[in-house]
Amino acid sequence: MAGNSNPGSHGGLTNNAVVDNGTMCVQASPPPGVIFGAPRTLLDLNIPGPILVGKARRDPGFNFDGSPAEDMMAGDKPAKSAAIRSDPMFNKSDDELNAYMRSLMTSTSIGDMETVALEMQKRFADATGGTYHSAILDAEIANNPAFVTYHGAFLKKLIPAITNSVRGYSPSSLPPSMASLVNPLNITPLTMSLLNFSSFWDKISGLGITVHQVWSAKAELKDFHVESSGRFWLCWLHYTFYDHFGLDWEDILKHGDDRLPKYHTGDQFKAWYILQHYRTAKPFITEMSRKVYISGRIA
Amino acid sequence: MELTPLSPYKHTFSGQYGNSRADYFFSSRGDWRDAGYRARLVDLVRNTAGDAPQDFDSYSLYVYEKTATLNAGFDGDADALRGVHDADLISFTRWTRGKMDIFYLIEDGDVVYDVLEDEAINPPWEFD
């Protein structure tokens, strides 16, 4: 935290222009700058956040019913997959299986996304686990039409929720009454759908094989601001998407016989599955983020 | 329309939310676009669950379509259903600490309708 002021009535710093990063404190900020042509005053409201405003109904690593997700398990030799033990792929060495899997990555991705796909494959083969993040992957999602549609649909619900939460804001109402009058913290998190990349382009360019469909999602507001007239609000909307880089048996039922884009695509999926559930490779969580600047009129 | 218990009937486990149970049923599939069908299914699920959601941190109820495999003669466990018969799912409902917080209608393995939001899912996404 920067600055050297005393804590305000809500725990934040008052008269301090520096955003109180990482806290949920309400703070009154001093000038500078012009918002929508209106000069800001000491009465401006700034909430650093993050404020949770959206969430999928399941969390990373778990199914909707709260049981552990099968595609995040490793070395578990599931009974339901007994049939794969008699598949010719099952007798191949780890090196051979990894070569098949790398071929799957390169045949379903292009350009920078091929680099990402191979990086993910290596992390999987090395049993690194943990959480993977890539700026390339973030950028790929930000430019994808599915995300643009997804974002538009979410905004249709979020904008009214924010506007309603700050309606009644009056610049003459100073802390401590401010928090009760103007409080997007009171927004009940909206239900978020699961972003899906399944277009033909996604299948050949990399998002199909590296993500396909996100497992979970959340949306948060940061640097939420109501300008002094009380007529406008503005903030950053941060999306975080989570996915599992792993396979479950259902994936083999769906793709184990695939012959496109290559004759051995089905075998390549089997190689992935065998490495994860019968050898020593380890799935991991992929975390993707995107932030968008949003604003709205209160009245 | 009725819900008939499907093996494994009741699956109790310690999960993300704590003490959890999932119950399984099969039924005939109706058209989820039909509001009357949706209302009947919601009533059936609520009545079938009864007070069970109050007894667990998380309680889930799965309804599968009756098929040549999924019927009174099926004897598989929860693991034999998940990820194997997802395309036969009709609905999934979850209560967390006694409160219903998910009611999805599912077709071809995709979530197509959110009963609690009372809206079709567009585009649909895989239940998984």
Image (tube, coloured by chain):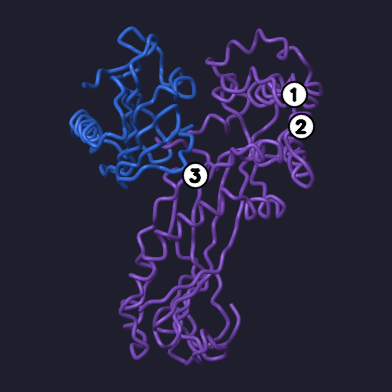
Chain colours: A purple, B blue
Helix, strand or loop at label 1? It is loop
**Separation of marks 1 and 2 at Cα, in angstroms:** 8 Å
- Location of residue A145 with respect to B66 vertically, above or below: below
Indicate the quadrant where residue B50 lies. top left
Front position among marks 3 and 2: 2
Q: Is residue B47 left or right of residue A233?
A: left
Indicate the quadrant where residue B18 lies. top left
The answer to whether marks 1 and 2 mark residues whose Cβ atoms lie closer than 8 Å is yes
Q: Position of residue A138 (x, y in %)?
A: 66, 53
Which one is in front, A93 or A153? Answer: A153
Residue at screen point 33% across, 7% down: B73
Q: Position of residue B99 (x, y in %)?
A: 26, 44
Helix, strand or loop at label 2? It is helix
Residue at mark 3: chain: A
Q: Which residue is mark 2?
A: A107
**Separation of marks 3 and 2 at Cα, in angstroms:** 25 Å
- Whether discs 1 and 3 lie on one chain: the answer is yes
**Kind of residue at badge 2:** Ser
Which labelled disc corresponds to residue A262?
1
**Kind of residue at badge 1:** Lys
Q: Position of residue A92 (x, y in %)?
A: 77, 15
Q: Position of residue B23 (x, y in %)?
A: 31, 25
Residue at mark 2: chain: A
The disc, 1 or 2, on the residue closer to the chain's N-terminal end is: 2
Q: Which residue is mark 3?
A: A194
Instruction: Determine crowd level at label 1: few under 14, some 14-19, many 20+ residues with C-alpha closer than 10 A.
Output: some
**Kind of residue at badge 3:** Leu
